[in-house]
Image: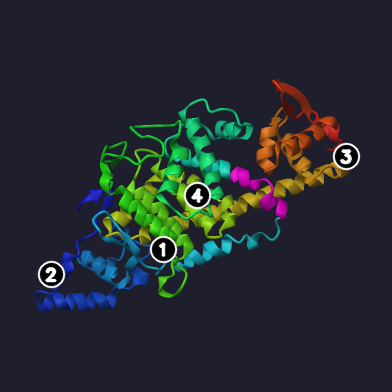
Amino acid sequence: MAKIQGVEIPPKESLLEQLWQDNEGREIFVDLMNSVDTNNHGFDSKGNYLHWDGFLTRSREFKGRKELAYLVLKMKRSLKPHDHLLDENDQPFFYTENGLMAKLYKVDTLITFEHLQGATSYDKNLHLVQNVIMEEAISSAQLEGAATTRKVAKEMLETGREPRNMSEQMIVNNWNLIQYAEDSKDESLSLGLILRFNKIATEYALENEHTAGELRNAPVFVKNNMTNEVIHEAPDAGQLETLLNRVCEYANAEHKTGGEFIHPVVKACVLHFMIGYIHPFFDGNGRTARALFYWYMLKSGYQNFRYISISALLKDAPAKYMKSYLYTETDSNDLTHFIDYQLSIIIRALERFTEYVKTKARELQSAIETLKTSPVYNKLSLQHITILEKALKHAGRTFTVKEIESDFNVSSTAARKYLDTLANMELLIKFRLKGRSYGYIAPADLRERLCVD
């Protein structure tokens, strides 16, 4: 059987046509129509939408007839054209809502954060946003090949220092890209906006023959770096503007009523897919695609999605991410494969964020309980307590105005005031970094200074 990147290529639909050539074939077809069930045979044990690659190892009752059974399954999945999206050969993309609704319901439930009733508004709003944006910026760059540690990258973003190499530049670019995606959420999608996303993603971090923010002018073949196997041949450069304009029309179309309804999370996933599939740039396609996904989620009213990092999970399983593209492309443009995988990633990201909030809430509550016994407790704000919580855990740690400004999403003046207040109380040690910049060190004897156990 033919394979791409280890993925089994589905059987050709012409096999079904051959069944109608005699009575025996027609009987087999009728039998399969009665025995193949979309719910029992179309999903794995975790509820994930099955491609032929996974179907092969299941459904033993179809031994000897699996190819025909899969083709019948496809017929019964009731795939329908996805709006007016077409590939470079003017063939439609398809999808089915069968199997997606449960995951979409879970996304909609988790994204409200109502299950976090025990967390305070502080836990959900004060400093988590910047931390998660940092994680997304770092992970997205690492997914594209940036080679630096998370600790170094976070330090760079927190302090605002200049990047020292291309990997760090990619991370800074992603940080700026995510923020720009939020700032531009009220715009309609246009070719110009897609180009700006790519320019921000790749500027000063150029690879290949890429020019930041410009469409490629030559063929692109996506390859496995280990085997050099061609995984995807992107559409011809001459078709890029036409294909991207179709994507813009799709993004800007109203799909909110009756039979035209498309769930906005589904649309965000499809926009993500289309940029990866079209591959309009020599570099930065993945980062541009993920920024467009975030942009559409925020545009559609999912404001809490600012707190969610999907790239960290995609980075942990890049092969599965690649397969979700291959499953769609090899299975007659069935977008359901990619959408289903992305929904699973979103759910995992939301669940991980839930644990993150709970952990932060516990840490903050522990710090509050500790500091309640201090004679200076009544002089401390929640921001002061948050800084001191970190200082108590990491003696010798240096805080900067830039970091606090980023953590609390406040002005540099407000951030400096928080730190100066703690320095004036002799709970941090202020020292000159360079020029007019100062650092604030967590003293080793902080507990003694606070008079706490």
| Residue 45's disc number | 1
Which three-letter amino acid code belongs to the residue tagged 4?
A: Ile
Secondary structure under the numbered disc 4 in the rendered image: loop
Residue occupied by mark 2: 18
Q: CA distance from mark 4 to mark 2?
A: 44 Å
Q: Secondary structure at mark 3?
A: loop
Q: Give the prevailing secondary structure in the magenta stretch.
A: helix
Amino acid type, label 2: Gln
Query: What distance separates the C-alpha of mark 3 from that of mark 4?
Result: 41 Å
Percent x, y of residue 221: 27, 41
Task: Specify which label sits upstream in the sequence, 4 or 1.
Answer: 1
**Residue 161 falls left or right of residue 370:** left
Single out the mark in the foreground, 4 or 1: 4
Q: Magenta segment, which residues? A: 120-132
Find out whether residue 131 is within the magenta segment: yes
Q: Is residue 63 visible?
A: no
> What is the x, y in percent for residue 344?
46, 57
